[in-house]
Image (cartoon, rainbow, N blue to C red):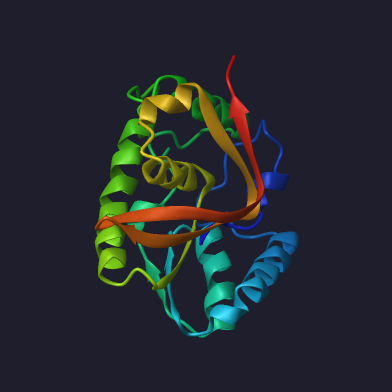
Amino acid sequence: MLARHAEPMSVVREAHLPLLADAENGLTAAGWAAATALAEALAGLGGKCLLYASPIRRASETATCVAERLQVPIQYEASLAERSFDALPQLTGRLSQQLQEDGLLAPECSLMGEESVAQHRARVASWFGHLQQQLLAKPDQHVIVVCHGGTIEHLMGLILHAPVAALARYYLRCDCAHFHQLSTALLGGQLAFILEGSNRARLHLRG
């Protein structure tokens, strides 16, 4: 299960204002309700799953709801964090969105000193390789990953063997608290992922 964090404070913040620091960007009241609903939807897994999460506050708070409902520990992974814009402390919400869009068109480029899309993909790919080895040893293991829209986009690209350059042609727009439910199987000794279901995710194609 790949789940995006629930609604953070930045969603309701005016776009011309500076972005909230990650440490300040916790969930809204609606976000906490959505995180609780997500946890309830996953309750059937009980203590039989591994729960990984980005350490960034909005993902951490979402994962905490899941962890408390399922009674499992959270394994925080820095590699699951969203693309970093730490080099741009005065970034506004509007400029952040523009950089996100421009980065998809030029994945190798760092337009203003931020982490490039390609660097983000490489970071996520390193963690995903470790997860694959774990699932090869135990393909029936339930895994929940709570992270960010951009991170999920890279994870889905890795699952589909799509190069990072493909983001210039299409990308996923994921709502808060959306999820992709996948299963795994061993086919000819190779690990295969099967998409079982998804909610609130839209594929955008560029003309």
Instruction: State the residue in front, 112 or 98.
Output: 98
Q: Nearer the viewer, residue 111 or 161?
A: 161
Residue 104 appears in the figure: no
Question: Compared to 60, does 90 lie above or below?
Answer: above
Q: Quadrant of residue 64?
A: bottom right
Q: Residue at x 67, y 75 (%)?
A: 40
Q: In this image, 62 relative to 109: left or right?
A: right
Relative to the observer, which residue lies in front, 94 or 47? 47
Any part of residue 128 in sight: yes
Question: Farthest front residue?
Answer: 188
In the rendered image, residue 65, in percent from the top left (x then y), is placed at 59, 74
Residue in the picture at 67% in, 34% down:
15
Residue 134 in the image: state x and y as whole percent.
27, 66
Does 43 sit above or below residue 92? Answer: below
* Quadrant that contains the C terminus: top right
Residue at x 70% of width, y 70% of height: 37
Horizontal and vertical percent for residue 96?
54, 32
Left or right: 165, with 149 as reference point: left
What is the residue that sits farthest to the top in this orientation?
207
Q: Is residue 67 above or below residue 169?
A: below
Give percent across and percent down for residue 5.
57, 57
- Is 146 left, or right, of 30 in this rendering? left
The image quadrant that residue 120 belongs to is: top left
Q: How many marks?
A: 0
